[in-house]
Amino acid sequence: MYAIAIIRYRKPLEEVLKVVDEHRAYLRDLKGKGTLLASGPFEPRFGGGLLLRVPTADAALAIRDGDPFVKHGVAQYEVLPWLPNIGLEELDKI
């Protein structure tokens, strides 16, 4: 299963930037485990997005809950479980 996570900042960018290094370290760990396929900020910078490979929707929620952005209260997640049809074979190869 896949999930798309939309992250929206809840605090001014200056406060978010204080947590960015910790957030990115968390994401690099997820990438190393094969859970995170891609991530990055939106433009204009009001948040960002994640493409996740997860076993269950609950696993995606656990990723949200472990993110330093959420722990520090600077951002919120909208987690959307996603069942791709077109391109699934290519995603599964990543």
Image (tube, rainbow, N blue to C red):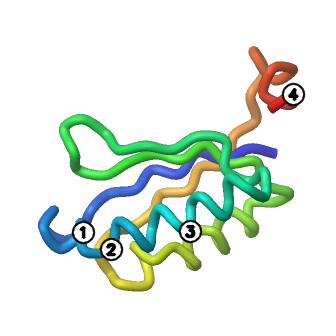
Quick check: 70 above or below 53? below
Residue at image location 39% in from the left, 68% down from the top: 21
Asked whether the beta carbons under mark 1 and mark 2 sit within 8 Å of each other, the answer is yes
Q: Residue under circle 2?
A: 19
Q: Residue under circle 4?
A: 93
- Amino acid type of the residue tagged 1 in the rendering: Val
Quick check: 3 above or below 59? above
Residue at image location 66% in from the left, 64% down from the top: 29
Q: Residue under circle 1?
A: 16
- Amino acid type of the residue tagged 4 in the rendering: Lys
Asked whether the beta carbons under mark 3 and mark 4 sit within 8 Å of each other, the answer is no
Q: Give the class, few, some or many, for how many residues have Cα within 10 Å of label 1's Cα (few <14, many ≥20).
A: some
Q: Give the class, few, some or many, for how many residues have Cα within 10 Å of label 3's Cα (few <14, many ≥20).
A: some
Judged left or right of residue 41, residue 31 is: right
Asked whether the beta carbons under mark 2 and mark 3 sit within 8 Å of each other, the answer is no
Residue at image location 35% in from the left, 44% down from the top: 41
Q: Which residue lies furthest to the bottom in this view?
A: 72
Judging from the image, what secondary structure is the residue with disc 3 in?
helix
Judging from the image, what secondary structure is the residue with disc 2 in?
loop
Picture quadrant of residue 60? bottom right
Locate the C terminus by quadrant: top right
Task: Return the disc, 3 or 4, that comes first in the chain's sequence.
Answer: 3
Judging from the image, what secondary structure is the residue with disc 4 in?
helix
- How many angstroms separate mark 2 from mark 3 (CA)? 11 Å
- Amino acid type of the residue tagged 3 in the rendering: Tyr
Count of numbered tags:
4
- How many angstroms separate mark 4 from mark 2 (CA)? 32 Å
Judged left or right of residue 55, residue 69 is: left
Quick check: 2 above or below 35? above
State the image coordinates of residue 84 (x, y, percent, origin top left). 74, 28
State the image coordinates of residue 45 (x, y, percent, origin top left). 22, 45
